[in-house]
Amino acid sequence: MKLRDSVRSFFSAHSYWLSTIAKGVMWFICATMINRYLGFSEVLSSPLIALGLSVFLAFPPMTVGGIVFSGVVLFQVFSFSRHAAIAVLAIILLAYIICGIYRCQRTEFFIIQPALHFLGLPFFVPLFTGLFGKAKNGGSVVFSCIISWLLKTIQENTAQLMDSTAPVTMADLLVKEVVSNPMFYIYLSACMAVFVVSHVITNLPIDHAWQIAAGAGIMAGFFIGLAGRLFLDRRSGIVSLIISSLIVAAAGLITSLFFRDLDYSRTEKVSFEDDEYYYYVTAVPKIHVGEEVNEVKKIKTPEKKGNRR
């Protein structure tokens, strides 16, 4: 507990610079993964460009970085296939429109999820959104998974799309690898299971809800992914699924342990007991309680002339 309090105090005292560094590191990972797997443009694939964009986007909100890197992805894909770029643009525009209608705030997931999917950590965004986000952010998780699968499909079939003599078109690829591919629906179901299970358990009035939510969410996604691979006889990715699930679960458990006891942005119900009583406490954030404003007026009575000397 002393270590946890020390860590919290350190993060609280340096929250601005730590969050800025974290955003810069995240955008550098995204830039590196994009350049490695979708680096079709030599200009944008330069490490200096990736470093410069990461430093620049560390200061504005995450949404700005998501928009900028969406343009980078579109330009990279357009460098080798116009049809693929049109498909990606259509999905990204649809995602922004629907998320704007339903006010899903985390549109930067459209880039972060594909980057982490390339890195082999597809459950990272769904888990942390379920733990720390709101239910309406589920729309951002859904579209980020769709975009990540589409970009991974383009990356895995680059040779066929670049070969002018090949009979495969982008429309055929979308039908075969996305619409008619059962692994796509297993991937989407696993990610949504991680998000839903972790978010539901997080809001339950039980002890250690955050830690249980992190473990249960990852287990739900892992078993769906494992069952799908075994049923479809695609066992080549089982080892990577196990390793990535363990890494994300450990990150979720450690983060929730250090930074989550109560969520001070909403009302929490807490229960505890001693030898004689059970205590049920409702913790309400101060920002939600309207403070009574008392105005004190001083009334001075006029002095009588007879009292003056």
Image: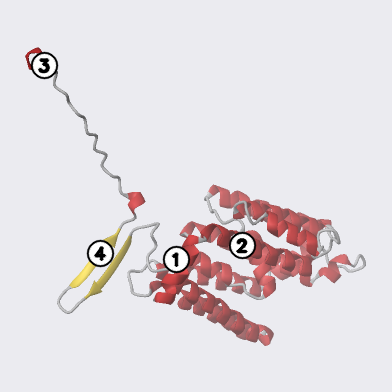
For discs 2 and 3, the disc positioned in front in the rendered view: 3
The furthest residue to the front: 309
**CA gap, disc 2 to disc 4?**
37 Å
> In the shown orientation, is residue 73 left or right of residue 258?
right
For discs 4 and 1, the disc positioned in front in the rendered view: 1
Q: Residues within 10 Å of mark 4 (few under 14, many from 20)?
A: few
The furthest residue to the top: 305
Q: Which residue is mark 2?
A: 21
Q: Residues within 10 Å of mark 3 (few under 14, many from 20)?
A: few
What kind of element bears circle 3? Answer: loop
**CA gap, disc 1 to disc 3?**
61 Å
Q: Which residue is mark 4?
A: 281
Contact (Cβ within 8 Å) of mark 4 with mark 3 = no
Q: Which residue is mark 3?
A: 308
Q: Quadrant of residue 237?
A: bottom right
Q: Which residue is mark 1?
A: 9
Q: Nearer the viewer, residue 156 or 24?
A: 24
Judge whether 308 appears above or below 209 on screen: above
Q: Nearer the viewer, residue 185 or 44?
A: 44
**CA gap, disc 4 to disc 3?**
60 Å
Instruction: Tell me which numbered mark, 2 or 4, is placed earlier along the sequence.
Output: 2
**What amino acid is labelled 1 in the image?**
Ser
Instruction: Tell me which numbered mark, 4 or 3, is placed earlier along the sequence.
Output: 4
**What amino acid is labelled 3 in the image?**
Arg
